[in-house]
Each structure stands twice: as C-alpha cells, then as structure tokens.
Amino acid sequence: MNTLLGNAPRHPGLWVDMTSATAPVKQGIETKQSANQGITELTQLCSQLAVLSQQGRWIVLINPPHIGYKQILANANVRMDRVLLVHTKDEVETLWAMEKALTSGTSSAVITWTTPLDARDNRRIQLVAKSALAQGVIIEDVNTHLHDEHMSDNTSAAPSRLNLSAFH
C-alpha cells in the first residue's frame, strides 16, 4: 500500500503502511484457547494494553464477545480513544482484518476472537507473524469447537437410536 499524502489525513489510517523509519519493531502472534470467551486472557493482557495504548497507536479488538470488555479495559486504564473495534461477517474477513491490522504499523496490539482455526488458517497466521508489526493475540473459543463436536456426535447417534427404537 502507499503512504497517504498530505499533512492531515481525515482517516486515522488504520490500514496505511508507515515508512520503515517510523515503523514499530516486528512482533509475534500468540494463540490462546479460552473456555470463558476470553475474559481471563483479556484481563491478563490489560496492564500491557494500558502501556501500549499510551503510545498513540491502535489497540484493535476484532469480534469481541459481549463480555464487558469495555469495563475491563477502562478499569485497567487503557486509553479508550485508542481502542478500535472491528466486527466482521465471517472468518475470511476476520483473518483479513487481523492481517491488515498486524502488518500496517498503526496498531500496537491486535486481539482477535475466533473459532478454532484449521491447519490452513494456522499456516496463514504463521506467515503473517513474520511481518507483524504489532502484538497479536488470537483467542479461540474452545466451547465452539466442543459444541460442534457434541453436535456432530449427537447427529450421528440420533439416527441409530431412532432406528433401534423402531425395531423394538
């Protein structure tokens, strides 16, 4: 992408690349699995997010659940004017938004809530991590994965039960 020209761009420039002289140091991406929608993980990150929010770059939250994250961040003295919420319609948009926020140089942290990623998406994240300029955290909701397995077990077992009861 090209750098915006002019003295005062009207958009905060979330997806605008910065020059290499002002770009932050390369960072990594960490995946955490959560059974409580990421409340514990977000709480553990809060002191670090408070420090990062003072740097003037964005703290990007992608698809945060309704867990009271605003109050958690505010209680930790995170600058709320530096928090950017991104809501996506599907996993493809989620990964795209995360990739852009991590590699743009305008974010200091990117926290993404998602369902467990498959092997292809994990590989994509590994590639993004090589050029990430912000701290990245992926919070995978393990309850979604367990719920999907439970549903698939029930759907395969239900016809058997029905068939067995039909023979009695």
Image: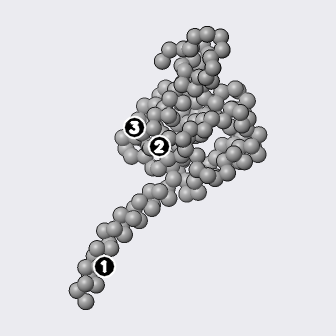
Q: Is residue 124 above or below residue 156?
A: above
Q: Is residue 50 visible?
A: no
Residue at the disc numbered 2: 89
Q: Amino acid at mark 2?
A: Lys
Mark 1, residue position: 161
Q: Secondary structure at mark 3?
A: helix
Residue 2 seen in the figure: yes
Model colouring: one colour
* Disc number placed over residue 123 in the picture, else none: 3
Which label's residue is closer to the chain start, 1 or 3?
3
Q: Residue furthest left?
A: 167
The kind of residue on which mark 1 rests is: Arg
Gap in Å between the C-alphas at discs 1 and 3? 40 Å
Given the image, on which type of amino acid does mark 3 rest?
Arg
Q: Closer to the camera, 5 or 161?
A: 5
The residue that appears at 48% across and 32% down in the rendered structure is: 99
Q: Residue at x 77, y 40 (%)?
A: 77
What is the C-alpha distance between the residues marked 2 and 1? 37 Å
Residue 3 location (% of width, % of height): 54, 14
In front here: 35 or 65?
65
Hey, which quadrant is residue 145 in on the image? bottom left
Which percent across, then down, holds residue 91? 44, 43
